[in-house]
Image (cartoon, rainbow, N blue to C red):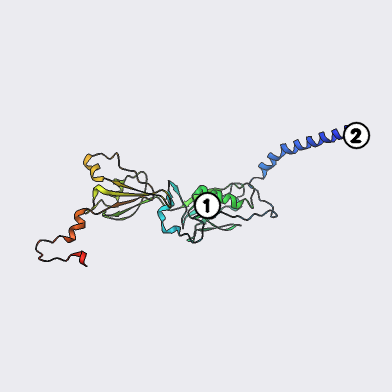
Amino acid sequence: MSVSERRGTFRSAVILAILIGSLLPAVHAQTAGQAVPPSTPRQLELPATDETRPGTDIGAAPQQFWTAGRYRLTASDVFELRFPYVPEFDQTVTVQPDGYISLRALGDLRVQGHTLPELREMLNEAYAGILREPVINIILKEFEKPYFIAAGEVAHPGKYELRGATTLTQGLVLAGGQTGSGKHSQVILFRRFSTDLLEVKQIDVKKMYADRNLSEDPVLRPGDTIFVPKNVLSRIAPFIPRPGLGLYVNPASQ
């Protein structure tokens, strides 16, 4: 082959490469979300975390499903998966008591304890084995609604739904108010930021009312616990003899 022929062959190869490179983006855009041929399956392997590690009892601390303002999936949650480009994959799933969901064409996947962004990433990785660049919309239908807990010396201890901006003093009102034996000056606010990080803050509700200043009244966050301890008088009351009773039993000796 002469020098001129070799140069002609080289120029033809370069032109062909440029044409192929210009066509690839268009082909890639057209095939996004389409099924991958069965000859290229991929097994999903997720790294073990506190939520996915076997034996982890996430349900033991339900308040952790509202941490740092992000909701974490828990048992009985229901959500829809919608695939805009391949609607035949659309389905509604429920988180089972063991934390798993059943995905069409993929099987079981543990999702309990994960946020929605984490779930979207997991699903993208799972469906990448059968779809090219899957586009998945997650619509949460039924979930653990925001709540706070009132405990200790309140009229009606329990779990209350948190609707809109609610302060600590408003939460106490919802719980029926503090009892006469509650120590209003040392109300405790427990706030969980993560599984391992818990903030404990003491609030002087008595002083706020006396000063008529609620500027330091904290706004409750989902999962907060308000605890009203007993005052000193209520703690020593069992040891104080009542008028008309000559003898009394010291509870400490029981």
Say which of marks 2 and 1 sits in front.
2
Residue 87 at x, y percent in the picture: 60, 50
Q: Residue at x 78, y 35 (%)?
A: 14
Quarter holding the N terminus? top right
Numbered circle sitting on residue 179? none
Q: Is residue 179 left or right of residue 189?
A: left
Amino acid on which disc 2 is placed = Ser
Q: Earlier in the sequence, mark 2 or mark 1?
A: 2
Q: Label 2: few (<14), some or many (≥20) within 10 Å? A: few
* Numbered disc 1: secondary structure: strand
Farthest residue, direction right: 1
Classify 218 as above or below 42. Answer: above
Using the image as rendered, state which of residue 108 and residue 138 is in the foreground. Answer: 108
The image position of residue 119, as x and y in percent, is 53, 50
- The amino acid sitting under disc 1 is Glu
CA gap, disc 2 and disc 1:
66 Å
Which of the two residues, 197 or 157, is positioned nearer the viewer here? 197
Mark 2 sits on what residue?
2
Quickly name the residue at label 1.
80
Q: Residue furthest bottom?
A: 254
Mark 2 element type:
loop
